[in-house]
Image (cartoon, rainbow, N blue to C red):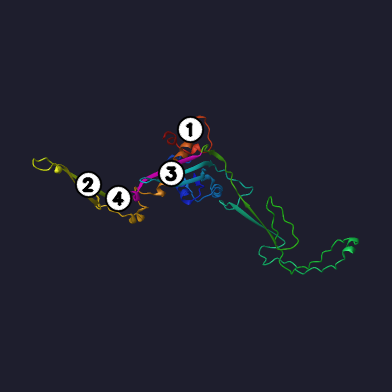
Amino acid sequence: MFVLVYATDATTTAYLAYEVAARFTPYMRPDPNGRAQWVMPEPAWSLADYAAQCQNDPENTAGALVVYDVENDAGTFNWLLYQQTYAHLYAKAFFVNCIPFAPPFRPAQPGMTSYSQTITYGGTPASPEPQIDKTPLPRATPIPPVAAALVPTPTPTPAPVPSPSPSPTPTAVPSPSGVTPMPTTAPGIVSTQNTVILPTMQVVWRNENEIDDFARQASVPFVSVAALGAYLASRSFTQTTTTSKTVPLVPGVSTSNAGSETVQVQRQANNTTLPYGIAILGSALLPLSSVNFGGSNQTRILKNAASGVATKVRNEIRADCSIKRAKNGDDGLCSLFNEKFFNDK
C-alpha cells in the first residue's frame, strides 16, 4: 500500500507520508501467498505515478491511501512571560484500488506503460529524406475581377510529378489490428501511433469529516526574564529615619524650652547586585529577544501535529472497517489489515 500526500510544502508532505505509513505498517495482513505486505510512503508521488505503478506491477500493488487538501496553520502566541508555538494541520483522505488495463494486444516486453508503432507507406523509415518533387507549379495568368465573374472556373489539372530516382522497393508493412492505414501520395511519409495505457482507479473509502490535529510547545521568552532583571537591577529606594526627643520640664528652666524635638535622617541607595548576580542594562536586552527557556522547535511541533493527523486517519478507517465487517462487506481496503488492527485501541 502506497501513501501519497498533497500538501503545499515539502516538509508537511514528507511528515504526513511517513507518519501515516508508520500508523498502518504494524497492522498489514500477509497476502494470499504468505508474503508480508508493506506500506510505502511516497511523498514525491502524484496519482499519475501511482497509475504507472498500478499498471506496471498490479500483483504487488494493494492500493494507495491519499491525504489531500492539507492546510498548515503555524505560528506563535506571545505574552509577556509566556510563549506558545503551535502547528495546526487540517486534511482529508481517501483510498484508491488498482485495476490494470488489458490492451487489445499487449506489448512485447512486460511492464511497459506505453507502446509505439511505426507504419511506413511508400518508403522505409531508413530513408534519409522523403523523396518529394519540389518543382514549383506554373502560375496561371490573373483574370480581371469583372471577367472572372463571367468566366467559369475550370477544374485545375495538377502538374505531373516527375518520377523519383530509382530506389529499392520497400517491403510492405502489414497494418496492425485496429489501425487504419493513412492515405498518402508521396513516398517516405511515416505515421507513428502512441498509446498510453491507464489503469482504473476507484475510490473505495473516503473520510466524511475533515481531520485535524493541534500541537503546541510552551516556553518562557528570555527577554521577559531579562527585562525583570533589568528592572530589579536599576531600582532605587529611599530610607527615612525619624527620631523624636521630649524635653522635660525642669524647675528653674524656662517653660519655652519644654516640648519635643524631631530629627529626620534620609538615605537613598541603588541596588546593583541581585541575588544571582543578574544585573542587566536595558541596552543588553535586544540580543536576547529570540532566546526562550524551554525552546521553540517548529519542526518538532509540525511532526507532532502530523502524527496526530495520521492517528486520526487510522482510527477513522478502523471504525468504518469495523462496521463493514459486521455487515460482511469488503471494499478492498479492510481486507488488508490483520485482527490486531481491529482489537487495538
Dot 1 amino acid type: Ser
Q: Residue at x 87, y 66 (%)?
A: 144
Q: Is residue 292 visible?
A: no
CA gap between label 3 and label 4 equals: 36 Å
Are the residues at dot 3 and dot 1 in contact (C-beta closer than 8 Å)?
no
Q: Is residue 34 left or right of 222 when viewed as pictured?
A: right
Instruction: Say which amino acid is labelled 4.
Output: Gly
Labels 3, 4: front one: 4
Q: Secondary structure at mark 4?
A: helix
Task: State which mark lies toward you, 1 or 4.
Answer: 4
Q: Which residues are magenta?
A: 210-225
Q: Please give the residue where the numbered disc 1 appears in the rendered image.
A: 322
**Three-letter residue code for mark 3:** Ala
Inter-mark Cα distance, 1 to 2: 80 Å
Where's residue 251, x and y in %? 8, 40
Residue indicated by mark 2 = 240
- Tell me which residue sits at (46%, 50%) in the image: 11
Q: Residue furthest top?
A: 326
Compare marks 2 and 3 and give the one earlier in the sequence: 2
**Main SS, magenta residues:** strand
Q: Residue 254 placed where, x, y %?
A: 12, 43
How far is the residue under mark 1 from the one under mark 4? 59 Å
| Disc 3 from disc 1: Cα separation | 26 Å
Whether residue 284 sits left or right of residue 55 in the image: it is left
Residue at the spot of label 3 = 305
Which comes before the other along the chain, label 1 or label 2? 2
Residue hosting label 4: 229
Query: Picture coordinates of residue 232 (x, y %)?
Result: 28, 49
Quarter of the figure with the C terminus: top left
In the image, which disc is placed on residue 234?
Answer: none
